[in-house]
Amino acid sequence: MESNHLPVAVIGAGPVGLAAAAHLLARGITPLILEAGSKAGSSIEEWAHVRMFSPWQFNVDKEAAQLLLADGWIPPPENEYPTGRELLDRFVRPLADLEQIKRHLQLNTRVLAVTRVGQDAMKTQGRSASPFLLRVIGPSGERDVLASAVIEASGTYLTPNWMGAHGIPALGEIEHAANIAYGIPEVLGRARSRYANKRVLVVGGGHSAFNALQDLVRLIQEAPQTTVLWAIRGNSLDRILGGGANDQLEERGKLGLKIRQLLNDGVIELFKNVAIDQVTSSGQGLVVKAGEKLLPPVDELIVATGFRPDLSLLAELRIALDPATQSAVLLAPMIDPNEHSCGTVRPHGAVELAHPEEGLFIVGMKSYGRAPTFLLMTGYEQVRSVVAALAGDWNAAKRVELVLPETGICNSDFDEVDDRLKASASQTSCCGTRETTPEVAPRTSPGCCKA
Ligand SMILES: Cc1cc2nc3c(=O)[nH]c(=O)nc-3n(C[C@H](O)[C@H](O)[C@H](O)COP(=O)(O)OP(=O)(O)OC[C@H]3O[C@@H](n4cnc5c(N)ncnc54)[C@H](O)[C@@H]3O)c2cc1C
């Protein structure tokens, strides 16, 4: 079946999916944007109250800005830090509302599965010539749509990690779900009564945990009986709290410094080396158990232990994922926190994001799999490169057009990883096929050599 006339499906109308659509339009390719929520950016709605740590200049895709400017959009001040709500109101929603985008956007449309017409994951013959088939569920029930390529930008916000240290729910975690929130609840807004004057344990060592801790400490001013406990898995606060004043994203650095100050002031009680096995309820509240250690009883738990990708919808496709990070194999060494303590990730694009399934690219937050530190500007560079590759413009796909801010906590391991990547990139052929690095190489070329 001929697929050239078909649109490129974009899964998810978050900022990266919409940016992909803008790049596709700029290259004369028709997008079909499928969004599960009733509005664009519906995952950001969940953290709309959180202030971002990157300023506007890093949060807006250039191609999308061109489309918006032509429509009379006034760009937000480059150096101001938006909340999630402001990101929605001043960028994501205006972009989704543009006539050029809106006519290709299907809201309330969840992608259930992606495959290829007449092919399951096993079948090879004729595979790359078969169009993609996406099973979706929308207001009028289930249906199938066809696409020439798929840009998967569905994010990971809807699939948070468990509190349990073993990757699966801690014993009792599901049973006590009513008192466990994942992510960053709106402690100073919608969820105020849930946390005011309560004993709250925050679990996790990333920026989401910092935000939750900071809000809970603010709540103490109005609700002085509120008690804030914090459990982290590791032993090193330095690594967790980041580069501070050395972080080139100033607000990200400041957040770490603020938490350090609150710890010094004794407003937050910290528990280190907590690998949680179980949560039980005692007469005094919920008790978290980590090995032999029992934490003081609390009323509520906030779990901010990161996110993981929902890979179920891609089960019939041939994707090559790093077994640890669940990101594309070539991207993994750049983002794997086991390999380096640096939050800085070198810009990357279609080569690093390719899978054995030609024409499929996982981009945005989901491209990082389970790894942290994804930045929007990285996602915008990804889709610029991926769309160039889909258009057959391999020179543009390989070009790097982004300089990323440093976190200030890089160590030398990162440089080694970077050198390895540079060496492997030098072995890249015109199609992006890695020729001599089997340990990281996709099994086939990404199939973007249409030119
Ligand atoms: C609290 C928080 C603060 C952050 N702060 C920053 C920051 O300061 N700077 C920065 O650069 N980055 C930040 N990030 C990271 C990242 O940039 C954001 O998460 C960003 O929203 C990711 O964009 P995305 O388009 O990849 O995914 P998302 O914004 O998650 O969008 C994915 C979209 O896909 C839809 N979807 C999901 N499943 C399906 C499906 N099966 N079918 C159809 N649609 C589907 C969702 O409804 C959603 O609209 C932050 C993240 C969080 C959680």
Image: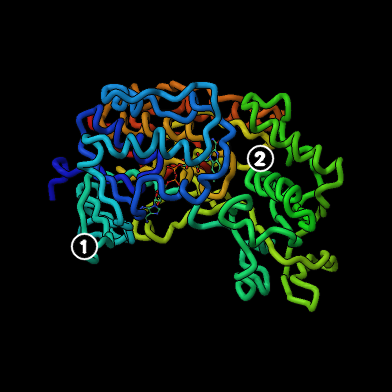
SS label for mark 2: loop
Dot 1 amino acid type: Arg
Task: Give residue 302's position: percent from left, percent from top.
Answer: 66, 58
Q: Residue at x 25, y 37 (%)?
A: 101
Coloring applied to the structure: rainbow
Q: Quadrant of the C terminus?
A: top left
Whether the residue under disc 2 has CB within 8 Å of ligand 1:
no
Dot 2 amino acid type: Glu
Residue 143: which disc? 1
SS label for mark 1: strand
Q: Residue at x 25, y 27 (%)?
A: 26
Whether the residue under disc 1 has CB within 8 Å of ligand 1:
no
- Is label 2 in contact with label 1 (beta carbons under 8 Å)? no
- Residue projecting furthest to the bottom: 283
Mark 2: give few (<14), some (14-19) or many (20+) Cα within 10 Å. Answer: some
Residue 268: which disc? none
Mark 1: give few (<14), some (14-19) or many (20+) Cα within 10 Å. Answer: few
Q: Residue at x 34, y 43 (%)?
A: 151
Residue 339: which disc? 2
Q: Is residue 236 visible?
A: yes
| Residue nearest the viewer, comparing 287 with 27 | 287
Name which of mark 2 and mark 1 comes first in the sequence.
1
